[in-house]
Amino acid sequence: MFRIFGPPGTGKTTTLLNMVDDSLNKGTNPNHIAFLAFTRKAANEAKERAAKRFKLDPEKDLFFFRTLHSLALSMTEIRPEQVMSKQHFEELGQKIGMVLSKTTGQEDLTEMQNHDHPILNVINLARLRKVDIREQYNQSYIEDDWNTVNYVNQCYKEYKQHRNLYDFTDMLKVFVDEADKCCPDFKVTFLDEAQDLSPLQWDIAHALDKKSKFMFAAGDDDQAIYRWAGADVDQFINLDGSSETLSQSYRVPKQVHRVAESIVYRIKHRYPKKYQPKEDEGTVKHMARLDDIDLTQGQWLILAQAGYILNPVVETLKSMGLLFTHKGHRSISAKISSAVNGWEQLRKGKNITLDMARDVYSYMSTGTHIKRGFKKLTGLDSDVLLNMELLQNSYGLMVGDELIWHKALDRLPEESRVYITALLRRGEKFNAEPRISVSTIHGSKGGESDNVIIFTDLSPSADDAMRMGNDDVHRVFYVAVTRAKENLYIIEPDDNNRSYHI
């Protein structure tokens, strides 16, 4: 297995896709190429690029451009209806007297699964790491006692066995056990984000290596930040075979690179590597507070090690009247935006769609603003266009253009009303694409922005890990710093005793 080390911004995935192109140019049958990615999004990107360039059918000709879980499901005899669903978790929960839910991310077939319930998470991590469940329990911060965890584990196994069901981790194990007979031979196999694989997923990687004439595993051990979710970066570092390091970053400017290098040298266990920054100098600034930074122009990524650290950030941005995304959601919901825009369009004498009209009505009071019986606007064709006069005459609207949005939409939450007012005062178009993204560092991996702000606060668990000499915290802040394409801003907490020093 040949390793490709891809430091930040060096084009690791692009390099793999170019190698796919080379294989196809040399006449390799597309179905003799496997491209395994960490997320379905990445796998589909590779599939779509190859299909477009070589005029291939993405489903027929590029069948093996998948996630590891998707590959396991397609190659084994496990049928989709045998995979644990939301309903199955709910039924199991009812039997054992707990609220259980489906694992997060299943719809996206992501390789890193994290169960919503802490006990199921312990059970799953033990299997991904190939350790005894008691060992995983002893290493966790779970509040439940061991007897409860053991009981749920036994019930979970019995439930799946009784109903002939499999969860995502079961799929991986079945594939490992049956790879010799169920997996075809490949001319070349590509594996992206290899530093994030768990021991069980590494078993799949080694099985694929045996089935492949050539296999390339790409990743960066310095960006391995998912050990808490079962990832085993040591296997990537210690992997036998030759390797190559991509040496030119197209993202990280010189000053940011210097900061990144000062962090990466703190990592004790790593594969030594060097890469060059891009020609731009960039800037690195230490700031006292978020509101000391001008956020009115440009693209911004605001990062912190733990989610709760970002809560005051969210409130500050709202008070400043700035539009942003947080946890993948817009700071003002699409429904509220639609309602406000819809009402203002009506006031201007314009037509709006039925969906927009329903959004408007949903934030109006029945009896004062809308006649009873008209709230849901039922019985209309989906393609109908509506204006103020038509809504007043035929569909129960009791108010008119004399009321601006915050008077007409009287059922808007007060928090939303205040925030929208702040947005409008600043001149923000709240239906526009947000320029600012607020995220944990883990959530930002793979992302980038012209401007990056990092809060260096540490959670108690991260602080403990630092004091114990754990490399993971260094890797987390290395990832954070290297998201910056131009400017990096560092904000330290008042309590420097629990802060990462950059």
Image: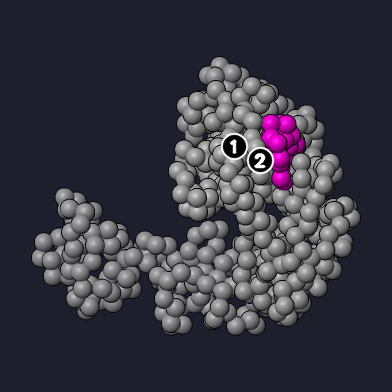
Q: Evaluate whether residue 93 shows in this view.
A: no
Q: Which residue is mark 2?
A: 188
The correct choice, above or below, for 368 with respect to 205 in the image is: below
Towards the viewer: 471 or 404:
471
Towards the viewer: 3 or 105:
3
Q: Which mark is residue 209?
A: none
Image quadrant where residue 210 sits: top right
Image check: 497 left or right of 385? right
Q: Which residue is mark 1?
A: 32
* Residue 202 highlighted magenta (yes or no): yes
The correct choice, above or below, for 341 with respect to 222 in the image is: below
Q: Which residues are magenta?
A: 197-217
**Callout 1 crowding tier (Cα within 10 Å): few <14, some 14–19, many ≥20:** some
* Residue 347 highlighted magenta (yes or no): no
Q: Quadrant of the C terminus?
A: bottom right
Q: Amino acid at mark 1?
A: His
Q: Residue at x 26, y 73 (%)?
A: 345
Residue 399, x across and y down, in percent:
19, 71
Towards the viewer: 95 or 176:
176
Q: Amino acid at mark 2?
A: Val
Q: Quadrant of the N terminus?
A: top right
